[in-house]
Amino acid sequence: MASKNRFITLSFFLFLILVLLPHAIAWDNEDHEIFTLVDELEASEGKDVNFYSWLGLEPTATEKEINRAYRKLSLALHPDKNHDANSKERFSRLGAITTILRNQDMRERYNFFLKNGVPKWRGTGYYYKRYRPGLGTVLTGLLVLGSFLHYMVMWVNYHQEKKRIRYYKHESREIAWGKRMKKQQTRKRVCVNGLTFVVEGDFVSFLAEDGIEYRLDEEVIDQPKITDVMIFVLPKWFYENISNKFTTKKSSNTTATREKNI
């Protein structure tokens, strides 16, 4: 049963990877928007100009400071006050850049590219390492996702096991009592799908090869608990293993010291 659970979980993960891989290797629309604005800004204002420096801000600027800088620069760049051919484009670009800096997710993306460099256009697309969360975030996300899938699998197995027990109880009684299912108090041994069961009154038991009888009762099956999923089990497993190794090592050292003293 455990190997079956692992197979189901692994298959689910492989399915998710195959589905999400085409999206994972491509740039998002938000990334392309940032790349385009960076290229246009550098072409218009200079190579060393970035979103913050153009607005006269530091990368740590608050939203209030961003709004203040936008109002100040928008007054200077407004097409009504500037009649050059590029005034409308610069004013529109200012609005787009300010929108990015006001949005937390978009600003984090831009900050990543500002720190690590913006990918360049190569004719068929932008080439560079894409924006991605840190290793800790990825591992945490995978652990949460794996725990969710694990929990789903446990519930599926729980219902399948109860259904399996009900099936064998019904089939065993039908063989022992007949199609009309008229209950009998006599003890009868029956065979269902190559397995041996004993029907006696209301009870049906599985007869093992060693002669021990195990009563079939779907109510004794434990319901899955959230504390049984990986996100809770793995830390406990690591802690217990480390504690056992430490205890074993300490015990060995104590024994060696005693033998030496003797």
Image (cartoon, rainbow, N blue to C red):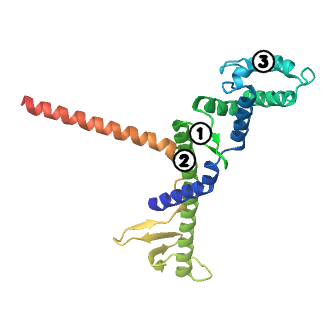
Amino acid type of the residue tagged 1 in the rendering? Arg
View extreme (front): residue: 84
Density class for disc 1 (Cα within 10 Å; few <14, some 14-19, many ≥20) is few
Picture coordinates of residue 24, whole percent (x, y): 61, 48
Picture coordinates of residue 85, whole percent (x, y): 87, 29
Which residue is tagged 2? 147
Picture coordinates of residue 123, whole percent (x, y): 67, 48
Q: Is residue 84 among the parts visible in the rendering?
A: yes
Tell us which disc is closer to us: 1 or 2: 1
Judging depth in this view, the residue of 200 and 95 nearest the camera is 95
- Please tell me whether residue 7 is drawn above or below residue 176 in the rendered image: above
Judging depth in this view, the residue of 187 and 193 nearest the camera is 193
Query: What residue is rendered at 75% in x and 27% in y?
Result: 102
Which residue is tagged 3? 69
Q: Secondary structure at mark 3?
A: helix
Density class for disc 2 (Cα within 10 Å; few <14, some 14-19, many ≥20) is many
Which residue is tagged 1? 132
Amino acid type of the residue tagged 2 in the rendering? Ser
